């Protein structure tokens, strides 16, 4: 092959048996359609037999791009007969295995003949492929593999095979599934892939990796379900994938490992396929593990952090995600990356203690949403509004709180102007309005959200009912709740039924409420039976009706009816489900107070506050109980109530007790203010806090 | 909108082969389906049992009717026909009905906000849902995530001691589709799930779906996303240039324009949508379907934009991967064919 670089393109030469021959003369004959003459001159010039001459001619035509011509030439060779001759010559050789030195040259001669024939078939298959005759091509190619399998029935030995033969075999192994795919014979393609990957072809790593990747693509995207690999290839105890997705993920992991072991060049698409496969079955934490196992340097460190952050956030591991994002958003790294900023802000918006940090991210995102990213400005403003709203929850002063509130509202309103169709944003705006008792605006946004989502989101129904209840339109609220029940599957009705019970209480129909709670309890029993065996389906568990809350609600209801005995039973039931609960301590306190056991009631309230320091009903109850202890303790009672108001400024009970306290202390003016606040808030009090829908 | 392919897709070849088999098995049902269809769509009166599945006008005629203003009403004859035809139980006829799922689901979901009655569409969707519920016996679909410390048919175990198989297997079980409950009506909170499961059924039969149906699917992805995606046309390319970009003002106008048809893309809907879209983009022989590839790319960009607007990492990850993968398949990207033998000027034995 030394004379290939002689410059001009058109000079093709034949080499064989130590002589050479310029191809132009033969080409001319071929162009005139005289295959026979071309063949004759080759046989003469290079002293070849018929098959050798034809093989060379076919190759020439193929290289010239004349695939029809190549086919005509190859059709002249009886390839089937050639294959049979090959097989018999090989089987003779292998029987005299002992005498190595004598057989080696003979074996190499027959290998040479074999590669000549197989190459001819291979080129024929390629020609057919180029002509779009895929099924014929595939069948020819399959004949190569069948022949090779018969010759080397124990797999191709590593050392004894000549390079050229191995190359043809490898090519044929690789192209066969492609040909079946092009012929739209997908079952045959799957069989060919498995044959390629599970038989011994002595493929080198590049071939093997390409075939594995190509099979992965087929498994993931063809939409053709492959059956499990046959039992014949299974080794005891080894893992056998059961379906396309499992097989694809396995192969991708194997490919990644090959890369780590240095057996394969890095191919970014492997990671993208794995990313798609794992994230569409919600396994982003597994994806994170695979990413972490990659060698450093494959991805830029910042890209890697961001990639991992997406994975962890997708898997609900927000803390891990946030700490990665903090690294990548560091001022020396990529502080203005919009995706990371938005993701970080989103994570922070869920926790009041992170909200201030989130505000920074969101503000940076707003500032950087320019040019190509202009369209994300609304999203950035939305995140800003959410973070500000959350930050307000732990504001240290009233002034600070109202400042944050108005800024939050401002951002959300600015966001909705840019994102008028974003239904999530509409919902958040509705909740924001509601929490600040702008019930008209809240109702308008909630309705808008409701219509946009066509009632498909359960929380929209609940928010509507709560807003209506805050407007004291109880019967309308109940109508909404009933309609919602109608549109909800049984296991998701828990929160709605609880709402309904509370609506009944508000309408002074406690017996109806008790009836609703009873129905809820019956539902819980049925659910326990039907879900008892299904542990896998975690979503079903999430949707489960919360039994604890039913007993708790019922205890409160009985307590309000002064049915202390019943209340106690319900409380007992609730405690069996959750031993330490501030809400239960509160209910117990109310019960004890009702029975005149004020000291024990106060202890319960204190215990509640110890369990959950920000539990507002416990704080208020504690304040009211301390207040009852006499004028000496007014200060500590007041501090408890003010504390409650700091956490939840719209709690009317806190204002009411504070008013009582002022009155007893002789500050009538202050008392009047507090009572007025309490009564105003009562006019807009929902039956459950608005944040319960989030 | 739905350009019919010039060349019949490979799937139709197999479909014809099977159709002759079933045509003899249930000729009466096929004939009934044809008779009632031609009374609804006079333009299709030339249908015969042998060309029912391959008739080139069938898809365009029916999908045009499905897009008409009152197409999904309870008394709509075409919906009735689709429902009855699917319920006939003949596999080929069921595949025929399934072709129209993208249009049905697309029109249906986009019209939900208009509060029009769509009982006709809902009946068809429920029939598909019920079919899938029965064939899965209501059970969830789950997969075991492979663990390379265990040997498999494709690799030998790593040096580490093989982990206790029971513990590892349990933790790496992934639910692909949750358990199915029977539904007699479309409750609004279950709507996404019902449509999602119908799309899962479509996905399992997607190799038998014609190109035009897939193109319609991609078109509706864009509508559902409610988001233009053209700013991602040069996704992850020459970023420096983009930062300069003065296209902001032109973009702004488009962003603020009222978008019709945007739907809540919860996971149960988004997951099958992404899997179907991935097929449209990366499925076998799609390189021959230029229109489909283009439409799938547009849909991909729109859904990616949507995932960014929702700041939803579970959608950003797969959509970003699809965008990157599709770029490797762009018609202008050069590929060396690894199955080509090396060319040389010396032709030797």
Image (cartoon, coloured by chain):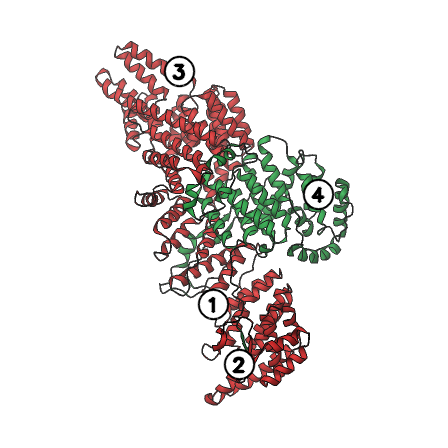
Chain colours: A red, B green
In the image, taking residue B50 as reference, residue A204 lies left or right, namely left
Q: Which mark is residue A680?
A: 3
Q: Nearer the viewer, mark 2 or mark 1?
A: 2
Q: Secondary structure at mark 2?
A: helix
In the image, taking residue A614 as reference, residue B118 lies left or right, namely right
Circles 2 and 3 on the same subunit: yes
Residue B192 is situated, as x and y percent measured from the top left of the image, at 55, 39
In the image, residue A169 sits, relative to residue A132, either above or below, namely below
Q: Which image quarter holds the N terminus of chain B?
A: top right
Q: Nearer the viewer, mark 1 or mark 3?
A: 3
Q: Label 1 near label 2: C-beta < 8 Å?
A: no
User: How far apart are labels 2 and 1 at the CA level?
Assistant: 32 Å
Badge 2 or badge 1: first in the primary sequence: 2
Q: Which residue is mark 4?
A: B61
| Extreme residue toward the left, this view | A632
Q: Which residue is mark 2?
A: A111
In the image, residue A401 sits, relative to residue A631, either above or below, namely below
Q: Secondary structure at mark 1?
A: loop
User: How far apart are labels 2 and 3 at the CA level?
Assistant: 98 Å
Packing grade of label 2 (10 A; few <14, some 14-19, many >=20) is: many
Packing grade of label 4 (10 A; few <14, some 14-19, many >=20) is: few
In the image, residue B279 sits, relative to residue A426, either above or below, namely below
Which picture quadrant has residue A139? bottom right
Packing grade of label 3 (10 A; few <14, some 14-19, many >=20) is: few
Instruction: State the residue in front, A513 or B75.
Output: B75
Q: Which residue is mark 1?
A: A235
Res. A496 visible in picture: yes
User: How far apart are labels 2 and 4 at the CA level?
Assistant: 61 Å
């Amino acid at each position: 092959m030394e004379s290939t670089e002689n410059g001009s393109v058109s000079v093709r030469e034949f080499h064989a048996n130590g002589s050479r021959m310029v191809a132009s003369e033969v080409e001319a004959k071929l162009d005139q359609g005289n295959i026979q003459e071309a063949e004759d001159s080759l046989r003469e010039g290079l002293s070849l037999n018929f098959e050798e001459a034809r093989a060379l001619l076919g190759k020439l035509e193929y290289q010239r791009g004349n695939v029809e011509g190549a086919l005509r030439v190859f059709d002249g060779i009886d390839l089937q007969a050639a294959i049979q001759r090959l097989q018999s010559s090989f089987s003779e050789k292998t029987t005299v295995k002992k005498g190595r030195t004598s057989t080696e040259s003979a074996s190499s001669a027959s290998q040479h003949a074999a590669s000549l024939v197989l190459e001819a078939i291979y080129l024929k298959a390629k020609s057919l492929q180029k002509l779009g005759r895929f099924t014929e091509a595939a069948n020819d190619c399959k004949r190569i593999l069948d022949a090779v399998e018969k010759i080397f029935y124990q797999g191709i030995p590593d050392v004894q095979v000549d390079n050229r033969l191995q190359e043809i075999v490898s090519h044929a192994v690789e192209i066969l599934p492609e040909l079946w795919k092009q012929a739209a014979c997908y079952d045959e393609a799957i069989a060919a892939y498995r044959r390629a990957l599970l038989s011994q072809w002595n493929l080198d790593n590049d071939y093997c990796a390409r075939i594995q990747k190509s099979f992965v693509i087929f498994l993931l995207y063809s939409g053709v379900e492959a059956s499990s690999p046959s039992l014949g290839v299974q080794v005891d105890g080894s893992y056998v994938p059961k379906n396309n997705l499992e097989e694809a993920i396995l192969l991708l992991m194997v490919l990644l490992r090959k890369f780590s072991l240095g057996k394969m060049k890095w191919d970014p698409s492997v990671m993208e396929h794995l990313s798609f496969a794992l994230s569409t079955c919600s396994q982003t934490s597994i994806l994170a593990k695979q990413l972490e196992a990659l060698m450093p340097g494959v991805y830029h460190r910042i890209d890697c952090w961001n990639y991992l952050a997406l994975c962890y956030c997708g898997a609900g591991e927000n803390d891990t995600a946030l700490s990665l994002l903090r690294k990548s958003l560091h001022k020396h790294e990529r502080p203005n990356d919009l995706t990371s900023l938005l993701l970080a802000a989103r994570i922070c918006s869920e926790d009041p203690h992170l909200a201030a940090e989130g505000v920074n991210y969101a503000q940076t995102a707003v500032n950087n949403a320019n040019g190509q990213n202009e369209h994300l400005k609304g999203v950035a403003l939305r995140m800003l509004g959410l973070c500000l709203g959350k930050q307000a929850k732990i504001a240290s002063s009233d002034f600070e709180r109202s400042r944050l509130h108005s800024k939050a509202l401002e951002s959300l309103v600015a966001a909705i102007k840019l994102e008028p169709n974003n239904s999530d944003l509409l919902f958040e705006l509705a909740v924001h309005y509601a929490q600040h008792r702008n019930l008209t605006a809240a109702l308008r946004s909630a309705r808008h959200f409701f219509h946009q989502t066509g009632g498909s989101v359960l929380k929209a129904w609940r928010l509507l009912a709560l807003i209506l209840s805050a407007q004291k339109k109880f019967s309308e609220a109940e109508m909404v709740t009933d309609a919602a029940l109608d549109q909800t599957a049984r296991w998701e009705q828990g929160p709605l039924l609880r709402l309904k019970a509370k609506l009944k209480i508000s309408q002074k129909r406690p017996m109806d409420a008790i009836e609703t709670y009873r129905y809820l309890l019956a539902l819980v029993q049925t659910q326990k039976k039907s879900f008892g065996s299904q542990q896998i389906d975690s979503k079903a568990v999430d949707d489960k009706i919360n039994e604890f809350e039913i007993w708790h609600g019922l205890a409160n209801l009985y307590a309000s009816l002064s049915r202390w005995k019943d209340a106690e039973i319900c409380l007992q039931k609730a405690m069996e489900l959750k031993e330490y609960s501030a809400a239960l301590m509160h209910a117990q306190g109310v019960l004890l107070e009702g029975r005149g056991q004020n000291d024990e009631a106060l202890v319960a309230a204190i215990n509640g506050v110890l369990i959950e320091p920000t539990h507002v009903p416990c704080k208020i109850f504690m304040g009211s109980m301390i207040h009852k202890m006499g004028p000496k303790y007014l200060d500590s009672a007041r501090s408890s109530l003010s504390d409650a108001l700091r956490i939840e400024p719209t709690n009317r009970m806190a204002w009411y007790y504070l008013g009582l306290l002022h009155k007893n202390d002789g500050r009538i003016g202050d008392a009047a203010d507090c009572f007025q606040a309490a009564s105003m808030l009562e006019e807009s009090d929902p039956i459950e806090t608005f944040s319960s829908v989030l | 909108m739905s350009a019919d392919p010039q060349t019949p897709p490979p799937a139709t070849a197999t479909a014809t082969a099977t159709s002759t088999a079933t045509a003899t098995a249930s000729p009466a049902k096929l004939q009934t389906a044809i008779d009632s269809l031609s009374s609804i769509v006079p333009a299709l009166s030339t249908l015969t049992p042998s060309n029912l599945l391959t008739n080139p006008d069938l898809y365009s005629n029916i999908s045009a009717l499905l897009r008409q203003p009152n197409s999904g009403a309870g008394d709509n004859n075409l919906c009735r026909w689709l429902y009855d035809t699917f319920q006939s139980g003949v596999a080929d006829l069921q595949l025929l009905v399934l072709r129209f799922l993208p249009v049905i689901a697309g029109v249906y979901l986009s019209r939900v906000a208009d509060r029009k009655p769509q009982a006709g569409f809902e009946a068809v969707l429920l029939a598909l849902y019920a079919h899938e519920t029965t064939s899965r016996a209501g059970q969830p679909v789950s997969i075991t995530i492979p663990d390379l410390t265990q040997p498999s048919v494709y690799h030998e175990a790593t040096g580490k001691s093989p982990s206790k198989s029971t513990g590892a297997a349990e933790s790496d079980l992934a639910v692909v589709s949750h358990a199915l409950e029977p539904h007699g009506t479309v409750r609004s909170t279950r709507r996404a799930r019902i449509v999602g499961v119908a799309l899962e059924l479509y996905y399992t039969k997607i190799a038998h779906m014609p190109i035009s149906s897939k193109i319609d699917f991609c078109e509706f992805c864009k509508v559902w996303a409610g988001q233009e995606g053209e700013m991602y046309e040069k996704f992850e390319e020459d970023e420096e240039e983009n930062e300069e970009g003065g296209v902001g003002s032109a973009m702004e106008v488009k962003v603020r324009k009222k978008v019709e048809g945007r739907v809540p893309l919860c996971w149960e809907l988004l997951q099958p949508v992404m899997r179907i879209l991935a097929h449209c983009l990366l499925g076998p022989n799609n390189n021959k379907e230029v229109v489909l590839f283009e439409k799938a790319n547009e849909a991909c960009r729109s859904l990616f934009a949507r995932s960014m607007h929702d700041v939803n990492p579970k959608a950003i990850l797969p959509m970003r991967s699809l965008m990157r993968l599709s770029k490797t398949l762009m018609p202008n990207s050069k590929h060396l064919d690894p199955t080509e033998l090396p060319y040389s000027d010396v032709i030797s034995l």
